[in-house]
Structures are given as structure tokens and as C-alpha cells.
Image (cartoon, rainbow, N blue to C red):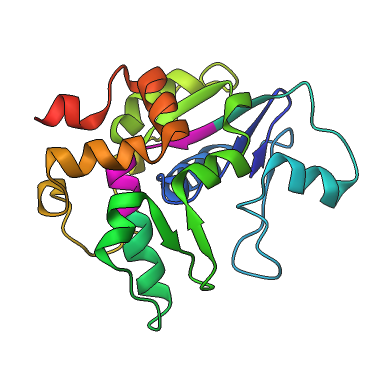
Amino acid sequence: MIIGESFLWLHFPKCAGTTTTFVLLKNFVTDSSIDFDETGRGEPLWHDTVAERERRINASLSGKDVLANIRRLPAYVVSKIHYSESLNADIRHAREHLLTGQFMEASGVNNSADNLLRLYDAEKVSHWVRTEYLEEDFVSVFSRYLDMTGKDLSALSTKINSTDYARDLGKWYSREDMESLYRKNPLWSELERKVYGNLLYEEMY
């Protein structure tokens, strides 16, 4: 999580959060009005939800705009599955996981795409940064709160903390597969229509 004077950014997993954090740190680490979570040591805080952070600090974060990154549902599910497997060699997902949007976290705990949206209270997010349009949306969203003049945003065009797998979604899904996946994740479907204007299979096929 990154907390500014009038905003807080949620590090929603597997949506270019590491890249987004890197760029914000590179350009604003000396800005005393912004609090960055320490990474790499101690208890992992950077994936906190708003409710979790409020419990940690015993204070309310209300009044701040909530920002978060998002990506298309099929791409998200494929990424999440491969990332979990890369962290835990004992985890192996079945085809059914790809088709339902269910997956295991690296800890072995079962989860799903829609459950994550519930956990992060997605309906309270003020502005979404689309992973597929990271450079464009980063400037559009964060310039509402931070001066982007002369900032180095070059890293937005690179992938940080990326897992090695086939990015061609046609390898994993047919149109019918995607339609089924969206039906089984109505919260993500509703959000994706709102943020992108359509669902991915309507654009791909």
C-alpha cells in the first residue's frame, strides 16, 4: 500500500503492482507526504486491504480516494495460477481452475478472482489503473494527486516481477471458455465492463 495526503493505492496482486510501486518510489521517495510500505523484510504489509491497514494502525483512512490496478479477467487468472506455482513447487492447478477463476495462493489456500474483489472492497475504489494501459492510466490517475512534471516514467513500459508463461490467451481459452469464466465471476465481469467498456472475448473474437 502507498498512502498520500488525499489518496491510498492498494497493491492488488498480479496487476503490475511491483512496477507501479517502483515508479512511484523512484520519483517520490523523498516526498514526506507519502508513506511507502517497506518491502523485503518483516511482515508483508504491501498487499494490505484498507480494512487490514486500519486495524494495523488503529485509525481510519476514510476521506482518501482509493486507487488500485486491474487487468482483464482471463489474463489475471492465468498470471495468478502461474505465479503461485512458481512460488510453491507443490502446487499444481487443473484445467478447471482456468475455467472457473479459482486458484491456490502460494500458501496453498484456495481463492478466486471474485473473492479478491470482495476482499479489496472493489466497489469503493475511486480510480482504476489498467495493467494493459499502464503508462497512459498511471499518468491519468496519479496526476490527480501528484505533480508528474519531469518525472521518469520509463519503467512503466517494462515488466518487473514477471513470471515466465505463454501470454497468448488463445493458448488457454476458446471464446466459449472465456464466456464461461466471466459467467462464473460476475463481480469481475461487472467491473471489467465498467472499466474497459467490454469483456475481453467480445474484443478478441
Q: Quadrant of residue 190?
A: top left
Residue 8, compared with residue 38, is above or below; it is: above
| Horizontal arrangement in the rendering, residue 25 relative to residue 23 (left or right) | right
Of 35 and 168, which appears nearest the observer? 168
Q: Quadrant of residue 156?
A: top left
Residue 63, compared with residue 72, is above or below; it is: above
| Residue 70, magenta (yes or no) | yes
Quarter of the rendering occupied by the C terminus:
top left
Q: Residue at x 83, y 52 (%)?
A: 56
Q: Position of residue 86 (x, y in %)?
A: 35, 73
Q: Residue at x 84, y 48 (%)?
A: 55
Of 57 and 193, which appears nearest the observer? 193
What residue range appears in magenta? Answer: 68-78
| Horizontal arrangement in the rendering, residue 66 relative to residue 82 (left or right) | right
Residue 15 visible, this orientation: yes
Of 147 and 84, which appears nearest the observer? 84
Q: Position of residue 85 (x, y in %)?
A: 36, 72
Q: Position of residue 6 (x, y in %)?
A: 71, 22
Q: Residue at x 43, y 78 (%)?
A: 88
